[in-house]
Image (cartoon, rainbow, N blue to C red):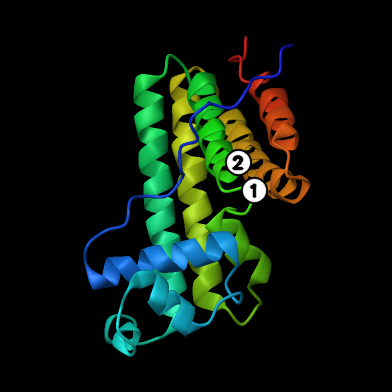
Amino acid sequence: MTTPTLPSTPIAPTPPIPPSTRDRLIHAMIHTLQHTGLHGAGLSEILAQAQAPKGVLYHHFPGGKNELAVAAIATTVSYMCAMLDKLMQTEPDAASALRKWAARALGGLGGSGFERGCPLAAVALESTAADVALRQALAEGFAAIRARIAGALVAGGHSDTRAQGLAALMVAAYEGGLLQARVAQDPAPMLQATEALLSMLSPER
């Protein structure tokens, strides 16, 4: 099997910077999570990234940094689900759509010099049992992404049980592959995991 190559023009996996102060704060938090993690930057850095005046954070997010992180998770999940929906509609089959989904993420990672990870993984790795709202947002977010993938697999001929299992594997390969590619500064781990998994997507006979 030939190892696929990355697109020549990397496509960032994050939405464009929005105009409102609230949305700029969310985008700044996504940027922070991708590059330095939840605890990697203080509020001053986030406010500077958002080009927002000091103190405005608590006007939009009374719960502070953690509430902003929950909003960043929800925005990221919404964007990822929308991207999956678009790819599932435009690609000939689920395997092609998922291959392009992974390639887009790797394009964004490579385009950042292997510095921009997945914001969901960053929060998941840093959260503790005390971070109830963060973990709930992540659990719901990952469930939504798995459901999108499973729905497409069911439509492609897989049983519901098999589709759910493959969807869980795909999300694990996506997140784990990005982590491995980032630390190795090499897309190979994610490409290998993705291709191995996609070879299993032929519907049951």
Please name the amino acid that badge 1 sits on: Phe
Position in image of residue 30 (x %, y %): 46, 62
Mark 2: few/some/many CA within 10 Å (<14, 14-19, 20+): many
Q: Which mark is residue 110?
A: 2
Q: Is residue 3 left or right of residue 147?
A: right
Q: Quadrant of residue 68?
A: bottom left
- The quarter of the image holding the N terminus is top right
SS state under label 2: helix
* Residue at the farthest bottom position: 55
* Residue at the farthest left position: 20
Position in image of residue 84 (x %, y %): 42, 35
Rendered residue at 65%/78% (across/down): 129
Rendered residue at 78%/45% (across/down): 184
* Residue at the farthest right position: 184
Residue for badge 1: 114
Estimate the spatial distance between the alpha carbons at disc 2 and disc 1, rounded to whole Å.
5 Å
Rendered residue at 32%/73% (across/down): 51
Rendered residue at 22%/62% (across/down): 19
- The quarter of the image holding the C terminus is top right
Nearest the viewer among 163 and 22 is: 22
Residues at marks 2 and 1 touching, judged by CB atoms closer than 8 Å: yes
Please name the amino acid that badge 2 sits on: Gly
Nearest the viewer among 58 and 140 is: 58
Position in image of residue 52 (x %, y %): 30, 78
Q: Which mark is residue 71?
A: none
Q: Is residue 105 left or right of residue 14?
A: right
Number of numbered labels in the structure image: 2
The vertical placement of 76 against 155, above or below, is below
Mark 1: few/some/many CA within 10 Å (<14, 14-19, 20+): many
